[in-house]
Amino acid sequence: MNASVREAGAAATGAGAGPHTGAGTDPEGWTGTWVAERLGVRLANEGLRGLLGLALRRNPKRAHLLVSTVLGKHVPQRPSAVLDAGRRLGERVRERLGAAEAARSVVLGFAETATGLGLTVAHGMGSRASALHSTRRPVPGVARYGGFEEEHSHATSHLLLPEDPDALRTGGPLVLVDDELSTGRTVRNTVAALHAAHPRDRYVVAALVDTRGGADVAELEKFAAELGARIDVVALAAGRVELPDDVLERGRELVAAHRDAPHPAPPPEVRGVLRRVETGWPQGLPDGARHGFGPREQLRLEAALPDMAERVLSALDCAGAPPGQGAAPAQRGDGAPRPRVLVLGSEELMYAPLLLAAELERRTEGRAEIRFSTTTRSPVLAVDDPGYAIRTALRFPAHDLPPHDSADGPDGPDGPDGGTGPDGPHGPAERYAYNIAGRGFDAVVAVVDSVGDTPALHAPGGLLDQLTGCVPEVVLSVVPSYVPDGTAPRLPAPLHGPDFSSYAHDEVAWLLRDLSDVELEAPTEEREEAIQAGGAHYAESLPVEYQPSADYQRLFHDALESAAERLARAVGTVTETVLAERGPRPVLVSLARAGTPVGVLMRRWARYAHGLDLPHYAVSIVRGRGIDTNALAHLAAHHDPADVVFVDGWTGKGAITHELARALAAHPRFDPELAVLADPGSCVRTFGTREDFLIPSACLNSTVSGLISRTVLRADLVGPHDFHGAKFYRELSGSDLSGHFVDTVSACFPAVRADAVRDAAAAASADRTPTWAGWRAVEEISEAYGIGDVNLIKPGVGETTRVLLRRVPWRILARRGAGPDLDHVRLLAAQRGVPVEEVDELPYSCVGIVHPRYTRGATGADGKAAR
C-alpha cells in the first residue's frame, strides 16, 4: 500500500469550540501566562489554551511543560470532563478508521500520563480488543514483550508486559495514545520496536494536543515511507509551540531564581485525620492495562463501582468538616458549602481511580465537588500565581520502588537535576502531587495499588503524611496489584444448534452453559414450597417439562393458525421500529427463553424486508439476580454495546423491564430499553402491539423455544467465569414445534408487510411513554385479594400460562367476554382444578395468581390446588 502520514488535528477554531472550550482553564485567566511572558513561549493556535497551561520543568532536557487541563494528571479536574475528553478523542479515531477497523484495533497508551487516557480512548472508539499501556515498572515473573525509549523524558524506558502477547499480534490497526504529541520521537521509537516484532500496515497516533513543528511532521512522514505503513495523527487540538533559541538556558535560570511556594506544615493538633477503607475490589480484576484490559474487565469494574463508591462515601464525613485551606467551598443549592473532594490516583494507576471518581461525582451531584488527579514522576517548579499551571507541589519519596532504588546517589535531593532526587533503574525516587496543598480540598481519597502500600507511603514525609498536613481528611484505598499467573480465564464460546437447541446454527447464538447432563428438575409443588419459604431461588432448579395432552396440542395448533398473521404483523412492527431507531445494524439479544422465538422472527423479518443478516444472541436474566455479566462481556468484545437491542416476548407487570434497567445501570454503554412483541402492561416504548392476546409460543415450554430449558443460576454449577446455565432437551425432539412455529409466522410476512410498515410509522409519531398501568393493576389485585406480594401475581395471557405450567396456581382472573385467546388457559385450569373468575374492567385478558401461602398441605390428595 502507499505509505503515508495523515493528519487529523483540530483546526484553531474547532479545538476549543463548543461547551468544552474552558473545561480546564483557570477562572482567573489562562494558566500559561506566567511562563509565556518570562520564557518567551507562544502558542501559535489559541485553541490550545482551552486544553493546556504552561509550567517550568525541573529537567535539563526540556524547559517548559505543557500542562493538560483535561487529563487529570497535574491539574485536578472534574472526572466527567476527563472522561469526556478521552471519549471525544476516541470518537475522532473511530471517524478516521471507520467503525469496522476501529472495532478490531489494538490500543496502546503511554505510561505514565496516558494510562487512563488510553482505556478511555479505546472505549470511545469502540475497540473490542484488549487495550494495553506501557509501564516503567518491571513485574517479576512476567515476560517482556518489548520496550522503547522516550528520550526527552525524566524516566526514559518503557516496557510492554502483556498477559496475552497475541493481543499485540492482531491484524488490525495499532492506536498509540498520549496526552501530547510534541516531536514524534517516542512514536517513532514505539512503532519501530513493535513493527519489528509484528509488522502491520496501519497505525494511528491519538493525542489530546498535537504541537509538532514542520520538521517533526516531515520526519514522521519519512519514517512512515521507510516503514511502508500508513500513520494517521488525530488530536483534539493542533498548533505550534514557538520557543526562543535559548529556551533551555532561560528555563534553567528561571527555575534557579524561584523556589517552590512554601506551605509550612500545620501544628500537630490540626493535622488531618487518616482512615483506610476497603472498597471490595473484585477478586482477580486487573488494576489497569499494564498487562491488558478488555471488555470483560471493563464490565466487571463497572459493576463493582457503585458498591465501591458507597464504601468510600461512608468513610468520608467531610460534609460536616471545616472548609479546607485556600478558596472557599462552592455553595449547595440550599446555601450550605459543598465539600471539595479529590480522588488522587498514583502514577500509572489512573483509570480505576478515575472511574471511581466519576461514580462519586454522579452520586454526589449537587452535594459535593469531586475532582480527580494523580501523583507523578514529573519534576515541575511550583509558582503560586493565577497565570501558572502548577500552583503548589507536594514532594515525597517514591513508595513503589525496590529497596535499591531508594538509596541516595550522587545526584541526591539537591543534585544537579534541580532537586528531583536520586534516580534508579525505574525512574526518579522522588514523586510529586500538584495543586492540592492550599487549593481548598476538604478531603483526599488516595488510591494506590498494593505494590505501593509500603512503609514509605506511611512514613514521615511520605505521601500520606504530606496529605494530612494540608487536607482535613484523607482516606486511603488500596487496590490489589494484578500479576498475571498464566491462568487468566477466557470468555466461553457461544452454543449453537443443532448441538445445543433445535434452531439452525445461524438463527441464534446461545450465551449459556450446557447443563443437559445435570438433574435439575423438581416437582412443581416441592419447588413452590421451597421458593415461598425462602429456602431456594426459582433459578436454582427447573420444573418438570409439561407434556401437553392431545386436546391441548390441538388448541396450540388452532391458536397458531388463527394468530399467525397477527403475530407476523407485530413482529414486523417491532422490527421496523428497532431498525428505524436503533439501526442500521442492531444486534438482537433475546432474553432466554421466552424472548428467543421473537428474536428469531425479528431476525427473519430484517432479512426478508431489508436483506439484513442481523446477529442474534440469547442471554439469561434472573429476577433478583440480574443479567449475565459474562454474556455482556462477550457482547462488548464482539459488538458496539450501543448497537445491542434487548428483546423479550411480552411484558406482564414489568418486573423484567425493571430488572434489566437495574442490571444495566452499572453498564451505561448498553441501552436498557426492551423491545417486545406485546406490551399489554405499558412498560416499554418499543413494541409490536399493546394488546393482550395469545402468543402461541407462550402455550408451551421448551418444545416451542428450541428445546431449551429456562435458565439456571446456581453457584455449584455456574462459576464466576461461566455463562448462566440451561438444558437442551434432546429427548423431546419428537414433540418439538419450534421450527413449525417460526416457519408458520414467517410465511405470513408478505401478507402483513404493508400494515407493519404503517404501524411502525404511526408508532414513530405517537406518544409511547410507558404508563405502567399494568403494575398499578397488579397492586390493586394484590390488595383486593390479600396477596401481599406482587411477585405472585402474573398478568397477561403469557404469564398466566406460565403459572399454570410451572407454578402452583391459586386462581385465574379472566376479563369478562374474553374469547378464544383464553381457550388453552381454561383447559389448563380445568386440568389442574383451578377456578377461573370472570371480572370486569381488567386491563389484561387474564391474570394468573400463584398460591399465596403455599405448602404441600395446600393441595388435595389428587394433587389439585386447594381453593
Image: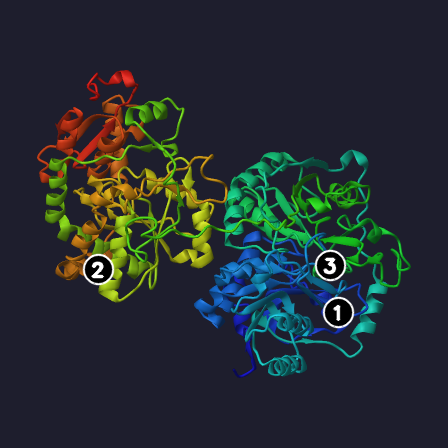
Q: What is the x, y in percent for residue 800?
A: 22, 34
Q: What is the x, y in percent for residue 248?
A: 80, 73
- Residue 854 is labelled as none
Q: CA distance from mark 1 to mark 2?
A: 61 Å
Question: Which residue is tagged 3?
Answer: 385
Q: Is residue 464 left or right of residue 230?
A: right
Q: Quadrant of residue 654?
A: top left
- Give the residue drawn at x 29%, y 48%: 596
Give amino acid for label 1. Answer: His
- Whichever of labels 2 and 3 marks the residue nearer the N terminus, that label is 3
Q: What is the x, y in percent for residue 473?
A: 69, 38
The kind of secondary structure element at disc 1 is loop
- Residue 761 is labelled as 2
- Residue 152 is labelled as 1
Q: CA distance from mark 1 to mark 3?
A: 27 Å
Q: What is the x, y in percent for residue 133?
A: 63, 60
Q: Quadrant of residue 802?
A: top left
Give amino acid for label 3. Answer: Asp
